[in-house]
Amino acid sequence: MPYAHITGWGMYVPEPVLTNDDLAKIVDTSDEWIRERTGIRERRIARAHEFPSTLGTKAALQALSVANLRPTDLDLIICTTSSPEYVFPATAALIQDQIGAPQAGAFDLMAACSGFIYAVNMAAQAIRSGSIRNALVVGTETLSRFVNWQDRSTCILFGDGAGAFVLQASSQPGGVLSAVMHSDGSGGNLLTLPVLGGRVPANEATLHRGHQYIYMDGREVFRFATRMMVSATEEVLRNARLSKEEVSLIIPHQANYRIIETAARGLRLPMERFVVNVDRYGNTSTASIPIATVEAVQSGRLKPGDTVVFVGFGAGLTWGALAAKWTGPLPSPRKITVSRYRLVGRVRSLLRRLQRYLEGLIWGRKA
Ligand code: ACO
């Protein structure tokens, strides 16, 4: 049975920065309150021409470049997002087209902020089963588009960004060691975005009530999060037969510094063992874990051979954790220029559109 290794990683955050002081000009809040209650100092906001697929594509290309893998070698793309570009088509399919990965199946996985852990586990299981060899997992968000900028209890929390992992099959032991996924739909009403779905139509009445915005019961989510971060971490370590002491780094979902701090206390682990960058990006939902991972690698905190635990929670309610032996790129005979494949992919995409258009003319499509 092949092992599923994480061999590539990438991230992209939009350039525009929104600081707490900027927010204090919009709603009744202060830099001090936001920093004390959440640890957030600033967040990134996508520009008008940036979308989940474009952010995700940039992160994905970087991850492929690190893995030294051609987009054309991808068998599967899973995109996790709480702010999909459309209800359908899947954002994963848009990314598949933009990176030029004609052999890959592509679908979106919706598990809110736990999505990235769920998706890495799904990709790893597909590799472990032998049915695929190379997978791309992308977490990408533009939640700023669903935030009510009049609601100070939520607009201070969220930021935009994307992160991606490449997973590959190898006979070398290591990679994903164990994973746990949990849910409790009875808490679905605690954190919700109604209008994207089919139950609450977008009409004057629902828009007037603000159903197009994120609603959150912050206190309840906070209590749930602190409990589940501890239990999921302990469970995933038990399943992998690892002790807490053997873990080099814990990379938690970045929602609130106090949640991470409370979880660290619950696990009796020092904060130095946790990666925290919520101060600079806020809560980027499904993108937060891969973004924190990329920064941990870049700063030298996460190295090949380290044991790492990813743990997250989110709407649903959902939560989960995944333990992995950190690998890095697999040996490869030659260096791949991913941008070249992207260019070929774009040409292929244009030709396919042209072919569809011409076929439409031949078969009598109305102009
Ligand atoms: N600035 C100033 N005051 C504020 C602000 C603000 N931005 N927001 C709320 N307040 C006020 C409230 O109105 C309240 O005032 P009151 O006592 O007069 O009523 C007071 O501050 C305390 O409010 P709480 O909601 O109790 O504040 P709390 O300490 O719980 O912090 C927070 C709120 C930051 C939202 C916290 O509950 C939290 O982080 N919860 C978890 C959120 C989370 O992780 N969400 C992401 C989930 S992941 C996903 O799936 C998207």
Image (cartoon, grey):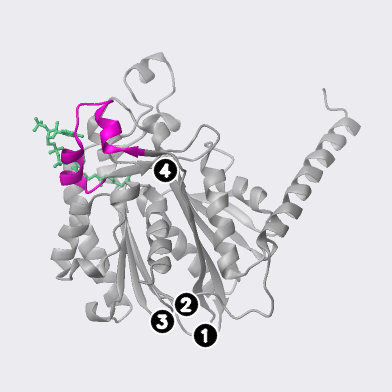
Residue 330 is one of the magenta-drawn residues: no
Please name the amino acid that badge 1 sits on. Answer: Gln
Residue type marked 4? Asp
Q: Position of residue 135 (x, y in %)?
A: 57, 64
Q: Nearer the N terminus, badge 4 or badge 2?
A: 4
Q: Earlier in the sequence, mark 3 or mark 4?
A: 4
Residue carrying label 4: 160
Q: Which mark is residue 102?
A: none
Find the distance from the CA under tag 2 to the CA under tag 1: 10 Å
- Quadrant containing the C terminus is top right
Q: Magenta part of the protein: which range?
A: 18-40
Asked if the residue under mark 1 is in contact with the one under mark 2, i.e. CB atoms within 8 Å, the reply is: yes
Going from the N terminus, do you reach mark 2 or mark 3 first? 3
Give the mark, 2 or 1, whose residue is nearer the N terminus.
1
Q: Are marks 4 and 1 in contact (CB under 8 Å)?
A: no
Where's residue 318, x and y in %?
32, 52
Q: Residue furthest front?
A: 21
Question: CA gap, disc 4 to disc 2?
Answer: 28 Å
Q: Give the residue at mark 3.
A: 305
Question: Mark 2, residues whose alpha carbon is within 10 Å: few (<14), some, or many (≥20)?
Answer: many
Characterize the local packing of mark 1: few (<14), some (14-19) or many (20 or more) Cα atoms within 10 angstroms: few
User: Mark 3 and mark 1 in contact (Cβ < 8 Å)?
Assistant: no
Residue at 63% x, 51% y: name it. Answer: 96
Res. 263 image quadrant: bottom left
